[in-house]
Each structure stands twice: as structure tokens, then as C-alpha cells.
């Protein structure tokens, strides 16, 4: 969650790239379907236009073929009139023309007019041929004598010539009708052929555009996937590796290696992190050294440098802590104060080095006599203190007896002592159950133990006195 309580909207690099590729894929799909539909509409429209115009061009082609057929048939008719073509073939061709008229109503009407005019031309040409055959050939030296039917040759020739002129006049009229009917078909416009070619090229280009657009989108999709793969390989994976590397730097354990990338900025980041790792390793080592030194100095600040037991500072801190614990748990806390008898005389007799050695051996004897939970400290000079958590007066007295016993075992000579020929100690013992009105520092316990020590020294030394009890002489060392 964000610090202001709002939901964090951040995402990882993989989720970011996946979201990006999904958005691009949606845009790509929408564009693909939009432009493909547009290309398909263009292609369909072009095909429909071309398909609608195709029957017109086919009709024009068919009309041209029919016109050529009519002109050819006219030539055959003329040849038939001259005897070069069979009249039966002409009639068969005319019958076929009746069976295959053009498509539109106007074209069919003109077609029928042309075929009808052609039939009249064929009949008139046949009649003209027959009339020409009836004209008698001129005979040299012949006279105008009557022949068949009482007509002379001249009269018959004139009669046939008049009929032939009428036939030829009708033939000219039929030819005029024929050419008029053919002219009704109209001439073929060159622009129609050009338009037909343009429409055909347009339909072809529309189909090619649709195919090329599809191919272009396929290449674009492949490019997007390639880009996604490159980003995952060269950006996402190195960034994940860098994050993992940073996580392990936080733990101080260096197991992973920095990832490689062909992107200069990421390589620079990796190089900087590697330098940072080296610096942090050195800093960690220096930190460990500093911690070790700190622990050593901390220990030195709490331990007496001569005897190895705790010093006065550590004693005061331990006393306050044990006093609060005893107060909370309502358990007793005992204190034994120890003083080396006539230590100044010992120091003057044997020197300071022997005095230091004496203090070391007294501290060692007191530590041996103490329990594992007790805290032994040098209180000052030749005085020592022993804190006994959970110990009542009886238990503290038993520990004090063990201290006397251990000191006697050391057998440290002290002939100048008025107490004994060996080093002896005086002990003051006090035990309290902390009450609510006794404060939190345990000073009352120290005052009581110090008063008991004073009483032991006043009674002749080399003895133990428990605060609040009658003074008794210290017997020979008796272990507890």
C-alpha cells in the first residue's frame, strides 16, 4: 500500500511489457480489421463495376461480330447473284441470322431490319440476274422481225431493260435500308475499350492492394512480437537480474552475478552496481571490524582491567536491572561486600605488583565460590561485590562461607597482618525483598551490605556479618 493509504498502482517490468503488447495488439487488430474491410470493400466495388461493365463490352463485341457477319453475308449475296455462291447457302445463313438477334430491343429491331433488307437484296439480285439473262443477245444483220408472242427483239429488250431498271431501283432502296439499319448499331467508341481496360486494371489493383495489405500487417505483427522479445531479453530480464542483485546486496550474501545486456545504459547501471557491491563489501568488512572493536571496547568498559571481573559501572547497571526484576517478581536479592584485610600493609610490604596479583587471586576465589547466576564485580580498590539474584540471607551466608574457604585455599602469605599470617577478607551480607517504597536503584541494599561489612571489620576482621543479625565469629572455612 502507498503511504497515503491509496492502493499502489505500480507494476513489474514483465506486467508492464505484457500490458503494452496487449494494447498494441488491440490497436493492431482494430487497424487490421478496419483497413482489411476497407480494402475488401474497394475490391468488391471494383469487381462489381467491372462485372457491370463487362456485359456492355461483350454486347459491343457481339454487335461488331454481327455487323461483320452481315457485311460478309452481303458479299456472299452479291457473289450468289453472280453465280459464285450457292443460293441455298445464302438462305441458310439468313435463317441463322434470324435465330441469333442482339440483346436490346432497339438492337433486335435494327437487326431484323438489316436482315429483312438483306433478304430483299438477295431476292432483287436474283431477279436482276434472271432479267439480265432474258435480254437477247444482238445478232448481226438481223432485222426487227417478230418473235415469241409477236414481239420483236427490240421491244423485248426494251421491256426487260425497263423491268431491270425497276429492280435496280428497288435494289438501291434495299441497300439504303440495309446501311441505315447497320448505322443504327452505332460505331464502336475507342473510349469504351480504354474504360474497359482501366476498370480491369482497377479491379486487379484492388485485389493486389488487399493481398499486400494483409502481407504488410503480417510483417507488422511479426515485428511487434520481435520487438517484444527483444525488450524482454535486453530490458526486462536484465532489470529483474539487477533487482535480484540489489536484494542480495541487502542480505550481504553475494551469490548472483549481474546480467549482461546490449543496451549501454543498462550495462552502465550494472557496472555501477558492481562498483557499489565492491564498495559495500569493503564497507561491510570495515563495519564488522568496527563492531568487533566496539564490542571489545564495550566489554573493556564493563570489565575491570586488572582482575577480569566486572567494574563499578557494570555493577551499578546490574544492580539496577536485578533490583527492578526482583521488584516485579517479588523475589529476594542479596549482596555480599568483600574487603581484603590490611591490604595497604600488604602493598607496602610486597610492592604494588604483588598487591595486584593478590587482588587477581582474591577475585578468582570469589568467582569460584559464586553461583552461575551471580555477578562478581570490583567495587573499588581492594573491595569487591557479589550480587546474588533470588538469594535470601541464609543462601547468601552459605556463599560467603565458600568465599572464605576459597581465600584460605590460596594461602597468600601476609606476615605483617595483625589478623593472620595469610591474606584474609571481611564480608558484609545483606538480603532484601524490594518493596514499592524502596526506590528503583537498590541503594538501600548497598547501604545495608556496607554497614554489615563495617561491623565485620570492627569486630576484628576475617569474618562474615549478615545485616540485621547478631555478630558471630567466622569459623574455620566450611563449605556450603
Image (cartoon, rainbow, N blue to C red):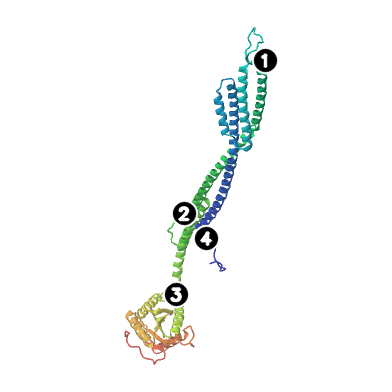
Q: Position of residue 93 (x, y in %)?
A: 56, 28
For label 3, the residue is 302
Q: Give the label, 3 or 1, closer to the camera.
A: 1
* Residue annotated with mark 2: 259
* Relative image position of residue 478 (x, y in whole percent): 31, 85
From the image, state whether disc 4 or disc 1 is nearer to you: 1
Spatial separation of the CA atoms under disc 4 and disc 3: 52 Å
Residue 340 falls left or right of residue 121: left
Q: Earlier in the sequence, mark 4 or mark 3?
A: 4
Question: Disc 3, disc 1: CB below 8 Å?
Answer: no
2 or 3: mark nearer the eye: 2
Q: Earlier in the sequence, mark 1 or mark 2?
A: 1
> Mark 2 or mark 4, which is nearer the start of the sequence?
4
Judging from the image, what secondary structure is the residue with disc 1 in?
helix
Name the image quarter holding residue 383: bottom left
Q: Which residue is mark 1?
A: 155
Question: Taking the image as drawn, is residue 462 in sight?
Answer: no
Q: Which residue is mark 4?
A: 11
Amino acid at each position: 500500500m502507498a503511504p497515503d493509504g491509496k492502493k499502489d498502482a505500480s507494476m513489474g517490468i514483465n506486467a508492464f511489457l505484457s500490458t503494452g503488447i496487449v494494447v498494441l495488439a488491440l490497436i493492431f487488430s482494430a487497424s487490421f480489421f478496419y483497413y482489411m474491410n476497407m480494402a475488401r470493400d474497394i475490391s468488391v466495388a471494383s469487381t462489381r463495376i467491372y462485372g457491370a461493365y463487362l456485359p456492355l463490352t461483350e454486347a459491343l463485341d457481339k454487335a461488331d461480330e454481327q455487323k461483320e457477319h452481315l457485311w460478309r453475308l452481303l458479299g456472299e449475296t452479291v457473289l450468289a447473284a453472280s453465280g459464285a455462291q450457292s443460293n441455298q447457302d445464302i438462305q441458310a445463313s439468313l435463317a441463322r441470322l434470324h435465330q441469333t438477334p442482339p440483346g436490346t430491343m432497339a438492337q433486335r429491331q435494327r437487326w431484323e431490319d438489316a436482315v429483312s433488307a438483306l433478304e430483299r437484296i438477295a431476292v432483287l439480285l436474283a431477279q436482276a440476274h434472271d432479267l439480265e439473262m432474258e435480254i437477247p443477245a444482238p445478232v448481226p444483220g438481223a432485222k426487227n422481225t417478230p418473235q415469241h408472242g409477236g414481239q420483236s427483239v427490240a421491244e423485248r429488250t426494251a421491256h426487260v431493260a425497263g423491268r431491270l431498271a425497276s429492280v435496280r431501283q428497288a435494289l438501291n432502296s434495299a441497300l439504303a435500308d440495309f446501311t441505315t439499319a447497320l448505322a443504327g448499331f452505332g460505331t464502336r467508341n475507342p473510349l469504351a475499350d480504354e474504360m474497359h481496360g482501366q476498370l480491369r486494371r482497377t479491379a486487379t489493383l484492388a485485389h493486389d492492394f488487399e493481398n499486400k495489405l494483409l502481407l504488410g500487417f503480417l510483417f507488422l505483427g511479426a515485428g511487434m512480437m520481435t520487438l517484444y522479445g527483444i525488450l524482454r531479453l535486453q530490458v526486462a530480464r536484465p532489470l529483474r537480474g539487477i533487482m535480484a542483485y540489489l536484494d542480495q546486496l541487502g542480505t550481504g550474501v553475494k551469490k548472483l552475478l549481474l546480467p549482461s545486456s546490449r543496451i549501454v545504459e543498462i550495462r552502465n547501471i550494472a557496472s555501477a552496481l558492481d562498483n557499489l557491491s565492491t564498495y559495500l563489501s569493503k564497507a561491510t568488512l570495515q563495519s564488522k571490524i568496527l563492531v568487533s572493536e566496539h564490542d571489545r571496547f564495550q566489554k573493556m568498559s564493563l570489565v575491570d582491567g586488572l582482575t577480569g571481573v566486572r567494574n563499578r559501572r557494570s555493577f551499578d547497571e546490574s544492580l539496577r536491572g536485578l533490583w527492578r526484576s526482583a521488584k516485579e517478581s517479588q523475589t529476594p536479592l542479596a549482596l555480599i561486600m568483600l574487603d581484603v584485610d590490611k591490604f595497604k600493609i600488604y602493598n607496602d610490604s610486597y610492592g604494588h605488583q604483588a598487591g595486584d596479583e593478590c587482588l587477581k587471586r582474591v577475585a578468582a576465589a570469589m568467582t569460584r565460590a559464586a553461583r552461575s547466576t551471580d555477578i562478581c564485580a570490583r567495587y573499588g580498590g581492594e573491595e569487591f561485590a557479589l550480587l546474588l539474584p533470588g538469594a535470601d540471607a541464609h543462601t547468601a551466608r552459605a556463599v560467603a562461607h565458600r568465599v572464605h574457604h576459597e581465600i584460605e585455599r590460596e594461602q597468600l602469605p601476609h606476615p605483617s597482618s595483625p589478623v593472620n599470617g595469610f591474606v584474609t577478607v571481611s564480608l558484609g551480607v545483606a538480603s532484601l525483598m524490594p518493596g514499592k517504597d524502596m526506590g528503583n536503584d537498590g541503594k538501600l541494599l548497598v547501604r545495608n551490605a556496607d554497614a554489615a561489612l563495617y561491623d565485620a571489620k570492627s569486630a576484628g576482621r576475617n569474618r562474615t556479618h549478615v545485616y540485621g543479625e547478631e555478630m558471630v565469629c567466622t569459623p574455620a572455612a566450611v563449605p556450603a
